[in-house]
């Protein structure tokens, strides 16, 4: 079996990654989550080519990130967007049942295999529990209730990940990224987000069902859960991957170091 291995040699980083390993153990085994095979300490090696440290073995994926795919096209097309959204939402529903909030759902952390499988990766910011007050994650994809914690601490739930997926869906539809906005400007846009001012975030030239489906609501009570999204016609009617014409853009990743 081919596996991807990350080797953490720094002892301080080893301590910080323990919670991530625990999360991986809890969520592994789902078709929309990168599989985790194990972690162990490799002591003073006899062979110099095998460094000492914490070795973490995960699924080796031949394909590309969603970010790579967005960069190759102006739009992925609604059928592909609905398919990808369904797979990510299915993964998020699995995390919700495990009481895990990911905190960093973004195209860079979504992997698409050369077979068209969609998997969520990178659980470094994930937290345990139904609620969280963490401000970790990438600001571009952070929900308003997450950013509010920079000034007033309060707890929020798994719907923060749904917001992040909504931003990613808009990027899939428009082939653009909001990350180029200055930090403070970006925070202001997110905290005052509404359907009315969506055009201030980028060039939203197309009227698309993906926008009506995915543009997140400011008030979390109005934002659907992962379970609710799975019954939405935009993704609920997708039964299989679209034609594989888009797959030739997927590239084999560099060998792990």
Image (cartoon, grey):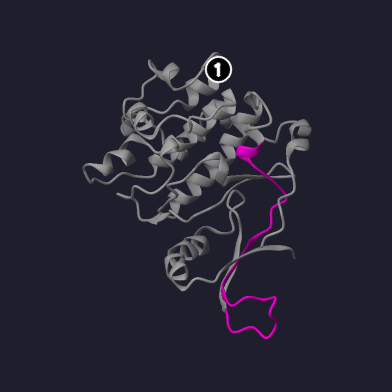
User: What span is colored magenta in the figure?
Assistant: 42-68
Where, by quadrant of the figure, is residue 15 drawn?
bottom left
Residue drawn at point x = 59 percent, y = 58 percent = 29
SS type, badge 1: loop
Q: Where is residue 201 in the image (x, y as percent from the top left)?
A: 44, 22
Q: Where is residue 145 in the image (x, y as percent from the top left)?
A: 31, 38
Q: In this rendering, does residue 134 appear at all?
A: yes
Q: Is residue 91 left or right of residue 201?
A: right
Residue occupied by mark 1: 208
Q: Position of residue 184 (x, y in %)?
A: 34, 32
Q: In this view, does 241 lie to the left or right of 85?
A: right
Residue drawn at point x = 47 percent, y = 56 percent = 124
Residue drawn at point x = 49 percent, y = 43 percent = 105
Total numbered labels: 1
- The residue closer to the viewer here, 57 or 50, is 50
Whether residue 19 is in magenta: the answer is no
- The residue closer to the viewer here, 204 or 24, is 204
């Amino acid at each position: 079996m081919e596996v991807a291995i990350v080797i953490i040699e720094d002892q301080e980083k080893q301590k910080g990654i323990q919670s991530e390993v625990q999360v991986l153990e809890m969520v592994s085994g789902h078709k929309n989550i990168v599989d985790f095979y194990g972690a162990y300490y490799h002591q003073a090696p006899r062979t110099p080519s095998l460094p000492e440290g914490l070795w973490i073995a995960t699924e080796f994926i031949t394909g590309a990130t969603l970010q790579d795919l967005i960069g190759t096209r102006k739009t992925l097309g609604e059928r592909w967007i609905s398919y990808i959204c369904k797979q990510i939402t299915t993964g998020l529903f699995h995390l919700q049942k495990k009481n895990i909030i990911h905190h960093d759902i973004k195209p860079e952390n979504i992997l698409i295999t050369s077979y068209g499988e969609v998997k969520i990766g990178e659980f470094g910011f994930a937290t345990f529990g139904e609620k969280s007050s963490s401000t970790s994650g990438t600001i571009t994809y952070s929900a308003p209730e997450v950013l509010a914690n920079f000034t007033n601490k309060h707890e929020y739930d798994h719907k923060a990940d749904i917001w992040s997926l909504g931003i990613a869906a808009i990027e899939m539809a428009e082939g653009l990224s909001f990350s180029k906005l200055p930090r403070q400007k970006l925070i202001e846009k997110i905290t005052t987000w509404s359907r009315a001012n969506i055009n201030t975030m980028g060039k939203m030239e197309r009227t698309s069902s993906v926008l009506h489906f995915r543009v997140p609501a400011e008030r979390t009570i109005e934002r659907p859960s992962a379970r609710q999204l799975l019954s939405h016609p935009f993704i609920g009617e997708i039964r299989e991957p679209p034609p594989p014409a888009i797959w030739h853009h997927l590239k084999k990743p560099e060998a792990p170091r």
